[in-house]
Amino acid sequence: MTNTPETPARTLRVAVVGSGPAGVYTADALLKSGQDVSVDIIERLPAPFGLIRYGVAPDHPRIKGIIKSLHRVMDKPEIRLLGNIDVGNDVSVDELAQHYDAVVFATGAVGDRDLNIPGSELKGHYGAGEFVGFYDSSPEFSRDWDLSAESVAVVGVGNVGLDVARMLAKTADELKVTEISDNVYEGLAQNAAKDVHVFGRRGPAQAKFTPMELKELDHSPTIEVVVNPEDIDYDAASEEERRSSKIVDQVCTIIENYAIREPKGAPHKLHLHFFENPVELIGEEGRVVAIRTERTELDGNGNVVGTGKFTDWPVGAVYRAVGYRSDAIDSVPFSDQTHTIPNEGGRVLREDDSAITGLYATGWIRRGPVGLIGNTKGDANEVVGNLVKDFQGGVLPAPAEGKGDNDAVISFLEDKGIEYTTWEGWYRLDAHERELGEAEGRERKKVVEWADMVKHSNDEARVTV
């Protein structure tokens, strides 16, 4: 690239915080920008890939195939992974800014939004993300899970709710062929659930399922999907949604087929309830024993109104799958209302709406947990376009003297005593997990303990790929 008076001759150095799809796509967009760049992807966990490794159900290898495309990006020499580093705690944002021209936050969303109904404080009420963290063997979540309830409720009619319901309805042996760790298999083997109830306050046309995930519910021989024919209802707006969206029409058709077919006699029942709005969790001795819903009906515009008819459904556990939320990063502006970093075009904004030079946000931390994984590519392209424009326009200050190269970052981390992991370390951990899986006739078995992940990542005696 030819340098103009406005184009700095130095290499653009960027720290991307977060190694999930949003972070990796941002790094890829930087490499494709035409600008001479060097990118460090800084990850809080010892292993990369974020949501793809720790947010996708283990029986969905099709989606996990996205890791292969992320892998190809991470293999590029201009990109370096620095894992096991918690930005905001282990290192400050100001410290990062001294080593890079720009910092891009791509930290995603792992927390659970609140249900905000009476009884939410009762034991046996969980965020879906907590359970996902358990069955995906995340080192941040509990190694044990109480699965003693025979009847369970899942609140929310999106794909996360489907994943949680399916994992509760499947048997441990069905999942043994996946990459689940030993503690997850042992926990699921104790699962007593026979009835899983999924509740949505609106109708089939407003459900946020994708057709393939909805259809896959029926693939398990142990699961019987049950839909009440009375829940099949559409108003004018719902019918228009079906006509204008092939996906909505497919979802509605699948649900209709579940409602009219003959029972197949599977031992676990997965009930999809529509037009039931959860209004209260009922407890005894501090624990959930039922969920109360109000029957709703369509208002003609695709929305619903309450009918005043209430039902108590006996359940021993409730999982809310009503959306993820992002967490704040120390010293970075954050909206407690939207759970996002305030920004314009990815440029981080102060309270007075002025941009903070050199700070950017992308993915769910920027716009909330909406859209599919592929949507983050367009997000990354926009943010990178603005970042490169700022760099070439001379807006971004250079790194502090003596801190603007790869060696300086490593010296900084070592001086702080941070035991970071690397991309080469991921290859070592990956090889170890594959060896564990191969010994049991499966592709992989995850390492779940944080310290063990760091140990295997930094075991240089292991041959790397």
Image (tube, rainbow, N blue to C red):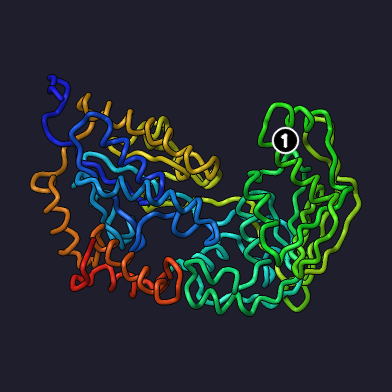
Q: Position of residue 391 (x, y in %)?
A: 23, 30
Q: Amino acid at mark 1?
A: Asp
Q: Quadrant of residue 365?
A: top left
Q: Position of residue 91 (x, y in %)?
A: 27, 57
- Relative placement, left or right, of 404 versus 170 is left
Q: Residue at x 82, y 56 (%)?
A: 293
| Whether residue 366 is visible | yes
Q: Residue at x 20, y 44 (%)?
A: 78
> Callout 1: 10 Å neighbours few (<14), some, many (20+)?
many
Can you say whether 313 is above or below 383 in the image? below
- Relative placement, left or right, of 100 versus 321 is left
Q: Residue at x 55, y 79 (%)?
A: 186
- Relative placement, left or right, of 364 versus 251 is left
Q: Position of residue 307 (x, y in %)?
A: 90, 46
Q: Residue furthest left?
A: 402
Q: Quadrant of residue 398?
A: top left
Instruction: Label 1, secondary structure: give it.
Output: helix
Residue named by callout 1: 249
Can you say whether 370 is above or below 67 in the image? above
- Relative placement, left or right, of 19 versus 40 is right
Q: Which quadrant is the C terminus positioned in?
A: bottom left
